[in-house]
Amino acid sequence: MIKPHGSEQLNPLFVYDVAEHQALTHKAASLPSMMLSSAAAANAVMMGSGYFNPLTGYMNLADALSAAEHMKTTSGLFWPVPVVNLTSDISAIKGHKHIALRDPNVEGNPILAVMDVEAIEEASEEQMRLMTEKVYRTTDPEHPGVAAFNSAGRFVVSGPIKVLNFSYFQTEFPDTFRTAVEIRNEITERGWKKVVAFQTRNPMHRAHEELCHMAMERLGADGLVIHMLLGKLKKGDIPAPVRDACIRKMVELYFKPNSAVVTGYGFDMLYAGPREAVLHAVFRQNMGATHFIIGRDHAGVGDYYGPFDAQAIFDDVPKGALKIEMFMADNTAWSKKLGKVVMMREAPGHTKEDFITLSGTKVREMLGRGEAPPPEFSRPEVAKILSDYYQSLDKA
């Protein structure tokens, strides 16, 4: 099986030992504590799950700046984005070496992790701007990732952590949330050697489904891991349970048995386009995938990134930095001329009118009226689930 990023073995930061877990939970109750930002809590869950292997905790300012500027930490570890715990209030933890980290996304703010504080540093406005610019390629406060990164505060609290739970992800999405450890185990159990990962934060339509089939066929893959984002989304995105139902229905009806699994991970979307695509590749390697599909405008938002920027950035990834390989995809759509889904760049002699493409808004309007999109665009069984959801919204 493919090795994890940066180490021989996967080292998740969740405390699996029952006795240690009980002792830490007991100890944490009496420690000084800080409330995490939603982004920092998501980072803890990703470290706990093994997805952010080999990180041992939150980065200090030097590592965060280095990751932002050079896609590596000061020790030379390849890492494409800062993984930080930012706050605006350090009054409760100043001077303390051991602290508890509270979860902002769960009622009662239970303790998510414990931390050994190695440093508390204040990032200057200039340093925040540099990290923002490098990671998001914009400083526009309207960009959802930029807004989240810059609203958490400028104090960088760094040091190793031990994770005590997986926030709301395991309880709210028990059928879908999986750690990198669990996915590696499942890949082993299924006997898959070549494994393709597909990232999604939306229901999968016909074009996505066919893209997965194309990738598997061309690569000669044994299995596909559909890996769904379960964390915070932007306004108007379809909730995870609805996406989950759509994707499961598609896999059940249109994929061979034992060829695809539907899983999810807990993270807050950065909407950082190219940099986030590289981060996605890192943690797909950590979960055991050998190949990762990078699509058009991967992890983008609005018009901040060019359609293929998230593919071009891999030219800047040093050779050997990642073991996972990319499957670079163009937009896929149904060709009226050929009567099947194709990659648009592989369909010469086509004009825009020769493809069936629908905007998200158009689909949303159709589904809201109880109309099914054309079967070339969306499988009828998937459209039905979405239509029921949109109609329930309109009645609410």
Image (cartoon, rainbow, N blue to C red):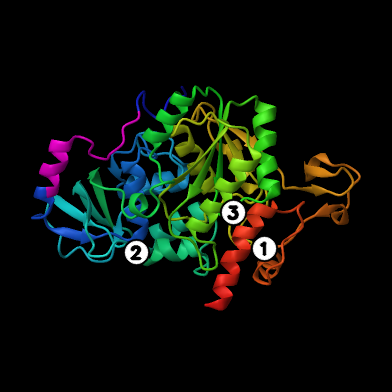
Figure quadrant of residue 29: bottom left
What's the residue at 31%, 42% (across, down)?
48
Q: Say left or right for 65 vs 331.
A: left
Amino acid type assigned to the residue bearing label 2 in the image: Ala
Q: What residue would you read off at disc 1? A: 360
- The numbered mark, 3 or 2, whose residue comes first in the sequence reads 2
**What is the distance, in whole Å, between disc 3 and disc 1 at their CAs?**
11 Å
Q: Position of residue 219 (x, y in %)?
A: 65, 27
Amino acid type assigned to the residue bearing label 1 in the image: Gly
Q: Secondary structure at mark 1?
A: helix
Figure quadrant of residue 362: bottom right
Q: Secondary structure at mark 3?
A: loop
Amino acid type assigned to the residue bearing label 3 in the image: Pro
Tell me whether the residue at label 3 lies in contact with that at label 1, contact meaning CB atoms closer than 8 angstroms: no
Q: Secondary structure at mark 2?
A: loop
Q: Position of residue 184 (x, y in %)?
A: 42, 30
Say the numbered circle drawn on residue 203: 3
Question: In this rendering, does residue 133 appear at all?
Answer: no
